[in-house]
Amino acid sequence: MKRLTPLSLLLIIGLGCIAPDWEDVSSDYESELNVFAFISLDETIPTFVQVRQTLGLEGSVYEFIGYDTLYNEDSSDYYIYEVTESRYAVEDADVTISDGVTEYELTLFDEDSLYEIEGWWRFNNFWSGGVYIDSFGLFVPEPNKDYFLTVTASDGRELTGEVTTPPIPEIKLESVPDSIDANTSYTIKFKHMPDHYGKIITSSGNWICGAEQSGFIEKGDSTWTSSVEDCGGETWGWDQPDTLTIELYSMDNNYYEYFIKHGFDDEFVNFFMGAGGSGPAFGVEGGFGTFCAVAMDRVETIIVPRE
C-alpha cells in the first residue's frame, strides 16, 4: 500500500432540453455572466475558471464561423462541415485570481491542448469554450487561505468572487489494509475536519463488484465504512486482484452550498443552469455561478474480487 499524488474529482455535466413546439418570442433580457471558478489544491490538476453568459430568448445559441474540410483516409473522401462557436462561452474576458498581495492572470485555454493536461479525462466535459487557466504555472494555492476572483468581459460586465480554501485532508495510512476483500466491509480513518464537509470515493482500475463506492463526510467525521454490495450473482466482472483507489477530499463552503446542498449529492450539478437560464450564486457577485475550492488526499491498495 502506498500513498500517491492525489487526483481530481470527476466533473460530470449533464444538459438537455426538449420542447414539442417552438414559437418566436422576444425579450429585453440583459445577458449576465455565469462563472464556474475552481481552485484545486491538487498539483496534478490545474485551477481553472470557465466563463459563460446567459442569453436572451432571441437568436441562435451558436455563431457561424466558417467552413472546414475533413479528409477520410479509408474512403479518400473529403467532407465539408460548418464551424460554429457557442454564444454561451465568453472568450474575451480578463480573468484574475489574487491572494490579496499578488494578482495572477489566467489566459484562455486552447482546447487543442487538452490532452497535454494531466488528468484531462476527468475534465473532458468542461472544455467547451470559455475556459481560462494559469498557463505559466505561477499560481500555487495554499490551504486555509483567502483568494479573490475578478472576471471582466470586454463589454464592461464584471463578476467578483471570494473563497477560503479548505484544509488538505489526511487519510491515516495505518487504517488502510494492504488488501481488501470485496466480500467484507472495511473502515478508513482520517484526520477529522471540524469546520469542513468532505467526500470519499473508491474505485478500481477494472470493474469489480463493490469496488466503486462513495460517501459524504459530515463536519467532524473521522471514519468512513464501506458497504458490501449485492452483486446478484454477477460473474462477468474482473476476477483478479486489482488496484483500489481511495480518494478523500475536503470542500469549502461555496462548493458545499452549490454542488451538495443545492445540487446533486452524488455528482456535480450542471452549473450552466439550463444553458441560458439564471442560477444560484455562491461566493460570487455580479452574476451567477460559484467560486469554490477542493483539496484531496489519495492512496492505493489492493482489492480482491469475490469468488
Image (cartoon, grey):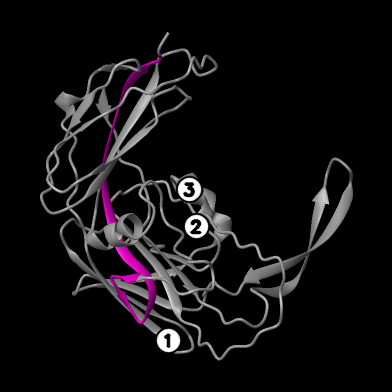
- Which residue reaches farthest top? 307
**Is tag 3's residue or tag 1's residue first in the polypeptide sequence?**
3
**Is tag 2's residue or tag 3's residue first in the polypeptide sequence?**
3
Query: Disc 2 or disc 3, which is closer to the eye?
Result: 2
**Is tag 1's residue or tag 2's residue first in the polypeptide sequence?**
2
Q: What residue type is labelled 2?
A: Phe
Tell me the tag on residue 157.
1
Q: Secondary structure under badge 2?
A: helix
Q: Where is residue 28? Give x, y as percent.
A: 55, 91
- Which residue reaches farthest front? 20
Q: Is residue 293 magenta?
A: yes
Q: Spatial distance from mark 2 to mark 3, Cα to Cα?
A: 10 Å
- Specify whether 8 is left or right of 195: right
Q: Where is residue 134? Give x, y as percent.
A: 38, 63
Q: How crowded is mark 2: few (under 14 residues within 10 Å), some or many (20 or more)?
A: some
Q: How crowded is mark 1: few (under 14 residues within 10 Å), some or many (20 or more)?
A: some
Tell me the tag on residue 120.
3
Residue at image point 89% right, 46% down: 76
- Specify whether 256 is left or right of 229: left
Q: Secondary structure under badge 1?
A: loop
Q: Quadrant of the C terminus?
A: top left
Q: Secondary structure under badge 3?
A: helix
Tell me the tag on residue 126.
2
Q: Which range is magenta?
A: 281-305
Q: Residues within 10 Å of mark 3 (few under 14, many from 20)?
A: some
Q: Which amino acid does label 3 sit on?
A: Trp
Tell me the tag on residue 15.
none
In this rendered view, identify the residue nearer to me: 196 or 264: 264
Quadrant for residue 203, please give it: top left
Residue at image point 35% right, 57% down: 259
Q: Which amino acid does label 1 sit on?
A: Arg
Q: Does the magenta stretch include residue 254?
A: no
